[in-house]
Image (cartoon, rainbow, N blue to C red):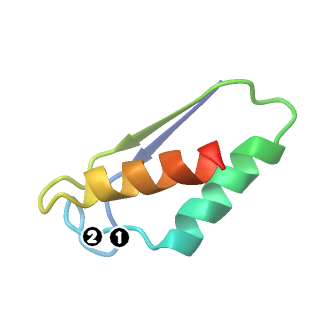
Amino acid sequence: MVYYRFHGVPHLYYSAYDQLFLEQTATAIKNAKHINKAFLYFNNTAQTAAIQNAQYIQQFIEK
């Protein structure tokens, strides 16, 4: 099991993560044989970036 916590870069709590970064993170989790459960917590909530990032990564994983 792994736990990821994202706070926003470069501006903590504000910045959204780009699609490439989210896709690379999701792919790394999917390809890691020792991981059977992953929790991703987005805390970049100051301008709703967390919602957008969470929705994007959820859709990417479901493909």
Are dots 2 and 1 in contact, CB under 8 Å?
A: yes
User: Is 35 above or below relative to 48?
Assistant: above
Q: Which residue is mark 2?
A: 15
Neighbours of disc 2 within 10 Å: few (<14), some (14-19), many (20+): many
Residue type (three-letter) at the residue carrying disc 1: Val
Q: Which residue is mark 1?
A: 9
Neighbours of disc 1 within 10 Å: few (<14), some (14-19), many (20+): few
Q: Nearer the viewer, residue 61 or 27?
A: 61
On residue 60, the disc is: none
Q: Quadrant of residue 1?
A: top right
Residue type (three-letter) at the residue carrying disc 2: Ser
Q: Quadrant of residue 21?
A: bottom right
Q: Quadrant of residue 47?
A: bottom left
At 45% from the left edge and 73% from the top edge, which residue is drawn?
18
Is 13 left, or right, of 59 in this rendering? left
Is 31 left, or right, of 49 in this rendering? right
At 35% from the left edge and 70% from the top edge, which residue is drawn?
9
x, y (%) of residue 45? 18, 52
Seen as rendered, the residue at the extreme front is 63
Determine whether the residue tagged by mark 1 lies in a helix, strand or loop.
loop
Looking at the image, tell me whether mark 2 or mark 1 is earlier in sequence order.
Answer: 1
| Cα distance between the residues tagged 2 and 1 | 5 Å
x, y (%) of residue 59? 52, 50
x, y (%) of residue 50? 28, 53
At 12% from the left edge and 58% from the top edge, which residue is drawn?
46
